Amino acid sequence: MLLQQRPIPGYWYSNLAGQLIQVRAILYISGKRNRVVLEDIHGKRSHVDAVGWRDMDLVLHSPVLEQQHAMRDY
């Protein structure tokens, strides 16, 4: 495991191969994160548990943040 990112719904992440995935939802049971619902750029949804999320080695890649920085610099 190289990197650990916190899953944030609506944000995009890229893996070491450069593939983009978006966190669509976080499912909680008894107040603890149980599953993370993911969607790739083709619309295919999947889900992983907390251990699976940590093992994915993702980098935050959020167009929302990039757009906010661009607007501020404009």
Image (spheres, rainbow, N blue to C red):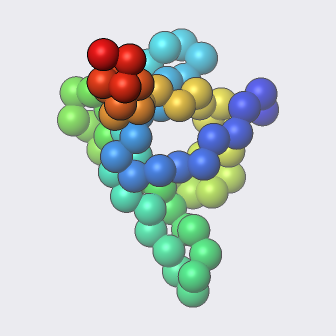
Q: Residue at x 50, y 74 (%)?
A: 28
The image quadrant of residue 4 is top right
Give the vertical position of 54 relative to 31 (above or below).
Answer: above
Q: Observer-nearest residue: 35 or 74?
A: 74
Q: Observer-nearest residue: 8 or 71?
A: 71
Give the vertical position of 19 relative to 30 (above or below).
Answer: above
| Residue 4 in view in this figure | yes
Q: Residue furthest bottom?
A: 30
Q: Residue furthest left?
A: 43
Residue 32, how many percent across, how many down? Answer: 61, 75
Quadrant containing the C terminus in the rendered view: top left
16 on left or right of 62: right
Q: Residue at x 53, y 31 (%)?
A: 60
Quadrant containing the N terminus in the rendered view: top right
6 on left or right of 27: right
Count of marks overlaid on the render: 0
Residue 49, how many percent across, how many down? Answer: 57, 57
Q: Residue at x 47, y 55 (%)?
A: 36
Residue 44, how many percent across, how many down? Answer: 26, 37
68 on left or right of 30: left
Give the vertical position of 35 relative to 60 (above or below).
Answer: below
Q: Residue at x 40, y 40 (%)?
A: 11
| Residue 66 in view in this figure | no
The image quadrant of residue 2 is top right
Residue 42, how many percent across, how many down? Answer: 22, 27
